[in-house]
Amino acid sequence: MGSIVAAMATVHAPQLVTLPPEEDQAQLQAGIAAMRELGKVLDETNPDVLLLIGIDHLETYFLDAVPTFALVTGERTKAAFAHTRHEVPNHQPLAKALLEGLIDAGFDLTFSENALLGHAFSTPLEYVHEGRNIPVVPLMVNVYLPPLPTPKRCADLGRALAKVIEGRPERVAIVASGGMSHYPGTWKYYDPEYDFDRWAIREMENGALDDLMALSGSDLDEVGNTEMLTWMVMFGAIGPQQGELLSYQPTSHHGHAVMRFLPGRSTPPPARTEPKYGGFQFKGAGYEFYKYPPSNTYSMQKLLVDLRGSASLRERFFEDMDAVISEREGLEPEQIEAVKTLQVKPMVDLGAHPILTLTSILVIQAHQRRLAAAADA
């Protein structure tokens, strides 16, 4: 009989990989150290497979197809971001059993034999998995292109996952990759809802999930926490376990949280003193920060995706920006000028998706720094 032997949740911020000089390096290293503590949980519990629940930042599926839930079922799991590349064995028997079992349970999942995953997967592979001899099964949740699944629907998916695992022989560890409050690429980027994060952490430390589960996708958008939908899948799988906070870093733009839920905590949980939702007052006006992007921005965003994913294209772009742009059809004049700035706001103001734009610019800037350092050397 199968079982879930470990359950954890972690930040996956791209800055943990690119280490931009303007970031507080002590905060980044604290998050990385906490992620490595999760790796020690894998050593302690010795799972047969790691179920890695992550998201897509318009890296894998872009706008050509956007699944609500998707499994990778091929022989290998591949993930890449910036200079990192990961390729680890996929646990195909469990992946295919989950696909069949979840469809039987009423979840119409997308699946891929050869998806290239982004930093929601590559960051935990870099710092939690760290090359351990543990095959993985990646599960992707849509958290940035509405309509989003509700927390309740994600929890229902988790319960169905657990039921499939119970009928299997494997010992399974779960890592939910995402969160906490951040608004990358938007006007609110440097004003996360840290108080909401701290309230949510206290609730999770106490195993109290009802108020979190009652939120809608647009509520989570308001507080910068749509990525916590991956945590909701985990909670559905394990039930209301008391969590243990390993690290919470309120960076200038993002609440970096790392927690573990199974094995259970060894000390009593802290008192719950924060007001409900950290005092946040929801407007209930629908999605504000991450909306479906206008169709006329497709070509601009496809260029950003390609620059993010191809080092050779980035180098050509640095050498002759106009030549690369001229190869693209459908770019409007103001979009061309916005792209040339290599700044997030001009492109977002024209309708580019904020997450896609920011992550692309981070990769481009990191590549520029490496080229400059190589030239100096």
Image (cartoon, grey):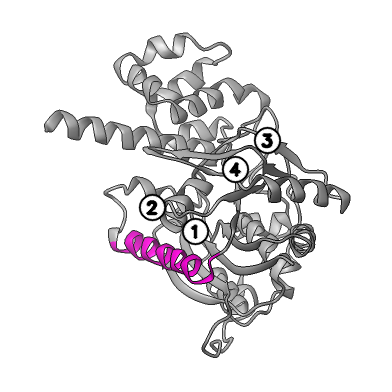
- Which of the two residues, 109 or 339, is positioned nearer the viewer here? 109
Residue 48 percent coordinates (x, y): 59, 59
Q: Between marks 4 and 1, how big is the CA–CA gap? A: 14 Å
Residue 16 shows which numbered tag? 2
Is 36 contained in the magenta span?
A: yes
The vertical placement of 20 against 163, above or below, is above
Q: Which residue is mark 4?
A: 56
Total numbered circles: 4
Residue 118 percent coordinates (x, y): 52, 41
Residue type, mark 3 in image: Ser
Residue 11 shows which numbered tag? 1
Choose the circle earlier in sequence order: 2 or 3.
Answer: 2
Q: Between marks 4 and 2, how big is the CA–CA gap? A: 17 Å
Choose the circle earlier in sequence order: 4 or 3.
Answer: 4
Q: Tell me the residue at 49%/45% (across/down).
A: 119
Choose the circle earlier in sequence order: 3 or 1.
Answer: 1
Residue 92 percent coordinates (x, y): 66, 44
Q: Between marks 3 and 1, how big is the CA–CA gap? A: 24 Å
Residue type, mark 4 in image: Asp
Query: Few, some or many C-alpha atoms within 10 Å of disc 2 (few <14, some 14-19, many ≥20)?
Result: many
Choose the circle earlier in sequence order: 4 or 2.
Answer: 2
Q: Tell me the residue at 60%/25% (across/down).
A: 297
Query: Few, some or many C-alpha atoms within 10 Å of disc 4 (few <14, some 14-19, many ≥20)?
Result: many
Question: Does dot 4 land on a helix, a strand or a loop?
Answer: loop
Q: Which quadrant of the rendered structure holds the C terminus?
A: top left
The answer to the question of whether label 1 and label 2 lie on touching residues, with beta carbons closer than 8 A, is: yes
- For the stretch drawn in magenta, the main secondary structure is helix
Q: Tell me the residue at 59%/43% (across/down).
A: 56
